[in-house]
Image: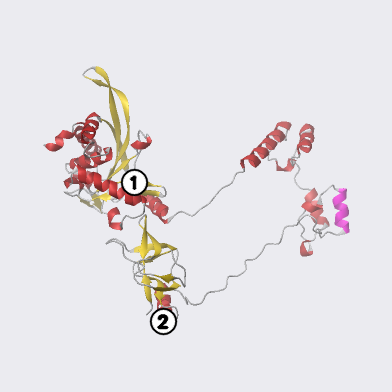
Amino acid sequence: MAEFIVMPKMGLTMTKGMLTNWRKKEGDLVNKGDILFDVETDKITNKVEAQRSGVLRKILVDKETVNVFTPVGIIGTADEDISELLKEAAKELGKEDIQTVEAPKEAEKPAPARQGGERVKISPRAKKIAKDLNVDYNLVTGTGPDGAITEEDIRKFAEGPKAKVSPTAAVLADQLGVDIHKIEKDNRIMKADVIKYKIDESLAKYAEPREDRQPMSNMRKIIAERMLHSVQTSPTVTYNIKVDTSAMKRLRDELMDKLKVSYTDMLVKIVSHVLLDFPLLNSTLDGNEIITRNYVNMGVAVALPAGLVVPVIKFANVKGLKEISSEIKNLSERAKTNDLLPDELTGGTFTISNLGMFGIESFTPIINQPEVAILGVNAINKESVVVNDELVIKPMMNLSLTADHRVVDGAVAAEFLAKLKEYLEKPGLLLL
């Protein structure tokens, strides 16, 4: 018996999805478990499997965003009547008649351009005037019946704006094959102008310049909308502080034999701990209420070719370094293969964005709404530092904290960074 294929609900927070690509065509045989189509939800792409076997009788939705449980196709046997399902789908989708497919209208074709050797419609009188005025009538657009060139067309063309050209420039333009009328200049055209035009024309042919246009992906649209919303919502200030990473490096080296951890793993662990002492930086503003928490859901930005996603380490403040490291690796790998679940991208209370691996020394991260702060992590560079009145070389890392000034005052942000610096430079404090 034929039935609807519906937009699935993939996560508690999902309300709609964009069907971007069907893997099967109408009339194709479908086996249970086959990948039917792709759905983009909140910056990730999910592959949707067939829940039963049959024939894909009708595709109802393609490259559209619809609510969950909305019919997107019909599956059944090859010869059964699906007219009632089509009527029901047409009503639910707001389409007049899904069975009726209008034949594509032939696009209006513009009048063909005049080709070489094609007979030009021009009266003998107009042709004689063109010869007298030294006008190439093949370049004239006719306004007469059926596009015929009239005497007035010839005279208007001949009386068109004339460029002021020096005699030398005119001779050179003729030698180089340059159309003097294509040189745009308010005052007199000189020899140098002709030479420059010819060089630019030659460079353009050599470079073969082109401009490509492509529509923004659904993921890119969401990123653009959220970044604009964040900038328009939060009055932000970015605070920078330098941290000596010598102790972090020693700890990392000591653990390397048993646990390969990254600086990001260590930052998630330490920042989650420090945030509990600064609840405003881990809060959310809801109208005139500030929501604070006794837990930390840490978002970790992951760069993908198509954009940025921020998977969330839930309750990072109660997890050990080993568990945090394993979870970050798992989420990052699945982010790159579009296998993240919608719930793994929601619920964050604070975000870390690390650009240090690209050599970035400072940047202004944009807050991931509805959070009120985000920490930018920069490159570790060896720098000269004064210690006990002596100049020594230390591996220094710059941290960039962007905070919503509606909730977080400068003094609070500064105290947080100072405390974070203390724990990063002495990670053993976590044992107290």
Report which residue position mark 1 lands on: 302
Question: What is the C-alpha distance between the residues marked 2 and 1?
Answer: 46 Å
Badge 1 amino acid: Val
Q: Determine the residue positioned at 21% across, 33% down.
A: 254
Q: Position of residue 407 (x, y in %)?
A: 24, 45
Label count reads 2
Q: Position of residue 269 (x, y in %)?
A: 21, 42
Residue density around tag 2, few if under 14, some if 14–19, many if 20 or more, within 10 Å: few
> Residue 278 magenta-drawn?
no
> Residue 131 magenta-drawn?
yes
Q: Main secondary structure of the magenta part?
A: helix
Quarter of image, res 249: top left
- Camera-side residue: 236 or 182? 182
**Which numbered disc flags the more N-terminal residue, 2 or 1?**
2
Using the image, determine if residue 3 lies above or below residue 228. below
Q: Determine the residue positioned at 45% across, 74% down.
A: 95
Using the image, determine if residue 359 lies above or below residue 38. above
Report which residue position mark 2 lands on: 84
Q: Position of residue 228 (x, y in %)?
A: 38, 49
Badge 2 amino acid: Glu
Residue 89 seen in render:
yes
Q: For numbered disc 1, what is the local secondary structure?
A: strand
The label number, if any, that marks residue 55 in the structure image: none
Q: Which residues are magenta?
A: 124-132
Q: Residue furthest left?
A: 432
